[in-house]
Amino acid sequence: MTAWTGPGRAVQGLILSVPVALFSLGTATDAAYLRTAQMQWSNFSSWAIVGGLIFGGAAFVWSLIDLAWGRRGVSRFLYSGVLGALCLVGLANAFKHSQDGWSSVGALGVTLSALCCVLALIAGWLRYSGMLDEEAGR
């Protein structure tokens, strides 16, 4: 089997870049909220998390389609697993941030945001490092 290249790979990379940016933004705005107690930072976090979930879910579905089409391997299963975990933790994070007022962030909200950020960065690293393509080329 040859390495997978073409517009589909590029589109998947573009879709994945959005949750990497938005979950990182969510973590940064949570930190800003904890330092300033300005409620608008929590609102920014909520919107960033929802946007990250939408595009993260699309990347997860795309990775499942890749697995269904027979592009299997340890790295691809790991990639899909990381994206699945990102969606679950991101959903819990969105629910936490939707709480009323000042309790919406706190220690748990920041921890969930940081975990989402780390999972998104791991997924991005797996996608952009070429590990998935090298495995397909074997």
Image (tube, helix red, strand yellow):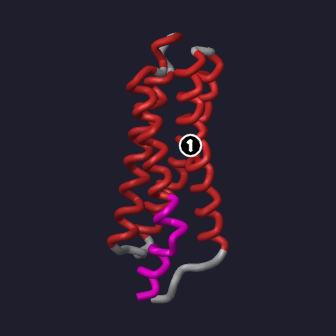
Magenta segment, which residues? 124-138
Secondary structure mostly seen in the magenta stretch: helix
At horizontal 60% and vertical 42% (from top left) the residue drawn is: 22
Q: Residue 90's quadrant in the figure?
A: top left
Mark 1: amino acid:
Ser
In the image, residue 49 sits, relative to residue 109, either above or below, namely: below
Q: In the image, 38: left or right of 74?
A: right
The one nearer the camera, 22 or 54, is 22
At horizontal 63% and vertical 27% (from top left) the residue drawn is: 44
Please provide percent x and percent y for residue 45: 58, 29
At horizontal 60% and vertical 63% (from top left) the residue drawn is: 13
In the image, residue 109 sits, relative to residue 63, either above or below, namely: above
Please provide percent x and percent y for residue 24: 56, 43
Q: Residue furthest front?
A: 35
Q: In the image, 22: left or right of 66?
A: right
The one nearer the camera, 111 or 49, is 111
Q: Residue 93's quadrant in the figure?
A: top left
Q: Residue furthest top?
A: 101
Residue linked to disc 1: 24
Q: In the image, 106: left or right of 11?
A: left
Badge 1 marks a residue whose secondary structure is: helix
* Residue 69: in magenta span: no
Please provide percent x and percent y for residue 63: 47, 62
Please provide percent x and percent y for residue 113: 47, 35
Q: How many marks?
A: 1
At horizontal 39% and vertical 40% (from top left) the residue drawn is: 88
